[in-house]
Amino acid sequence: MHSALTIAGSDNSGGAGIQADIKAISANGVFAQSALTAVVDENTRGVYGIHKIPPSFVASQIKSCLDDIGADAIKIGMLDDGDVIRAIKNELLSFSELKGFSNIVLDPVMVATSGDTLLEEAAIDVLKTELIPLARVITPNIPEAEILINQKITAADFEKACEALSKLGGTKPVSVWLKAGHLEDELLVDYFYNAETKETIKLPSRRVDTRNTHGTGCTLSSALAACLAKGMDLNDAVREAKDYITKAIESASTWKLGNGHGPVNH
Ligand code: PLP
């Protein structure tokens, strides 16, 4: 049995965060473990509070997972602040021999669909300099990518933006899945820049007319981590995860759960 570890915040309403990650990893046939970075009080309407977990306790959860079951891939989601980012980095570095260490998928979570902040502003540079260089793939949406490279991005700039984002990997460029969901177009085209083969893949999908998009980023990055945990080739894993998230959005599009942005299906 392959296993994946998600390091992320929780969503008590079940649509995003660790809860979405566990569902997506399980649905992709991989055993899911989790290390909680924060307990978030939220629902489909918004975020009401963030209860931080002490960085040393986040690190010890990671150690307990990796020391025992291990992991074939690791997904990193909501981090909240710089101290927890540094603690995660240090803990992961002590497991650099593990397969999962070379399969880190980092979703640079910053702001929820509801507009609530999930990463303190002061932590953005820490994320860029300390954690992105450890990742194999990053999965920003447009607002996150704009913050990471400090420039506006339109559909016409996707290729250039991917190149700039890839450089955040430092000496080892990081692969980039830049998501198009924030564009207004009918046909949305994500770009995947594979830094290992230096090729770019376009991932088109039709816009789904629905408010149920809560947890899409968490789901996509976890599905990708699960596919990598199974040993899939990077491009195949990305295509499989794209297929998974498309079906997850389509099949929940008429659901009526909550009064805000409802969850996707797993
Ligand atoms: N809550 C938690 C704990 C998350 O990790 C995330 C995103 O990663 C969100 C909420 C935001 O989800 P969304 O923007 O899809 O509503």
Image (cartoon, rainbow, N blue to C red):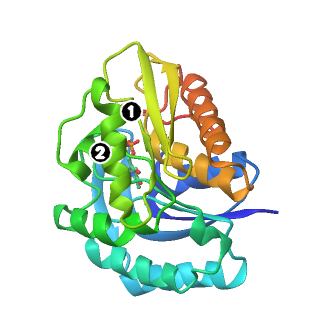
Residue 113 appears anywhere in the view: no
Residue 18 appears anywhere in the view: yes
- State which quarter of the image contains the C terminus: top right
The answer to whether the residue bearing label 1 lies less than 8 angstroms from the nearest atom of ligand 1 is: yes
- State which quarter of the image contains the N terminus: bottom right
- SS assignment at label 2: helix
Percent from the top left, x then y, of residue 222?
57, 51
- The image shows a total of numbered marks equal to 2
Residue under the image location 40 percent in, 25 percent down:
211
Residue under the image location 44 percent in, 64 percent down:
172
**In the rendered image of this protein, does residue 263 appear above or below residue 250?**
below
Residue under the image location 32 percent in, 29 percent down:
182
- SS assignment at label 1: loop
Q: Nearer the viewer, mark 2 or mark 1?
A: 2
**In the rendered image of this protein, does residue 106 appear above or below residue 147?**
below
Q: Is residue 91 left or right of residue 233?
A: left
Quarter-of-image position of residue 151: top left
Please identify the residue farthest to the right as the structure is shown: 1
Query: Label 2 belongs to which residue?
Result: 145
N-term mark: 2 or 1: 2
Amino acid type assigned to the residue bearing label 2 in the image? Ala
Q: Is residue 160 left or right of residue 237?
A: left
Percent from the top left, x then y, of residue 17?
47, 54
Query: Label 1 belongs to which residue?
Result: 261
The answer to whether the residue bearing label 2 lies less than 8 angstroms from the nearest atom of ligand 1 is: no
Percent from the top left, x then y, of residue 92?
51, 79
Amino acid type assigned to the residue bearing label 1 in the image? His
Percent from the top left, x then y, of residue 248?
59, 32
Please tell me the numbered disc located at residue 225: none
Determine the CA span between mark 2 and mark 1: 22 Å
Q: Is residue 50 left or right of residue 147?
A: right
